[in-house]
Image (cartoon, rainbow, N blue to C red):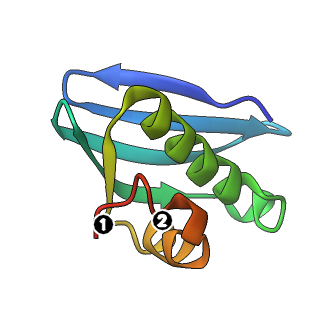
Amino acid sequence: MQIDEEKTGAKGRYTATVDGHTGEMTYSRSSSQLVIIDHTFVPDELRGKGVGQALARHAVEEARQGGWKIIPLCPFMRAHAMRHPEWQDVIQA
């Protein structure tokens, strides 16, 4: 699944489009070392297809590559962070 990124200043979003429907995860950069994931949206047409998980996994991979931490304010991202102890190196509770 291809995930794209859009950036506007300190804000951005990751998107994944499948069958003409787009899921997204939005974030705000609070510093060069800290990103706040604040929202995840997956339309009904994509539920159960792993889009939300792919977006969360992508955010974690980006944080590892960029050397920053994630504050998971979004309930979806927070729940996934709790289910994935292997992500704790980039999660700031």
> Which residue occupies 35% across, 22% down?
7
Q: Nearer the viewer, residue 66 or 78?
A: 66
The secondary structure type at the circle numbered 2 is helix
Q: Which of 82 and 18 is in front in this view?
A: 82
Q: Do the residues labelled 1 and 2 touch (CB within 8 Å)?
A: yes
Quadrant position of residue 86:
bottom right
The quarter of the rendered structure image containing the C terminus is bottom left
Residue at image mark 1: 73
Horizontal arrangement in the rendering, residue 46 relative to residue 6 (left or right): right
Three-letter code, disc 1: Leu
Q: Which of 31 and 88 is in front in this view?
A: 88
> Residue 3 location in percent, x, y?
66, 31
> Which residue occupies 72% across, 65% down?
44
> Residue 2 location in percent, x, y?
74, 29
> Residue 46 location in percent, x, y?
78, 57
Horizontal arrangement in the rendering, residue 49 relative to residue 83 (left or right): right
Q: In this view, does 52 lie above or below 54?
A: below
Horizontal arrangement in the rendering, residue 31 relative to residue 91 (left or right): left
> Residue 22 location in percent, x, y?
66, 42
Three-letter code, disc 2: Met
Horizontal arrangement in the rendering, residue 48 relative to residue 63 (left or right): right
Q: Is residue 36 above or below residue 7?
A: below
Quadrant position of residue 83:
bottom right
The secondary structure type at the circle numbered 1 is loop
Quadrant position of residue 30:
top left
- Label 1 – label 2 distance at C-alpha: 7 Å
Image disc number at residue 83: none
Figure disc tally: 2
Q: Nearer the viewer, residue 71 or 18?
A: 71
Q: Residues within 10 Å of mark 2 (few under 14, many from 20)?
A: many
Q: Is residue 43 above or below residue 84?
A: above
Residue at image mark 2: 77
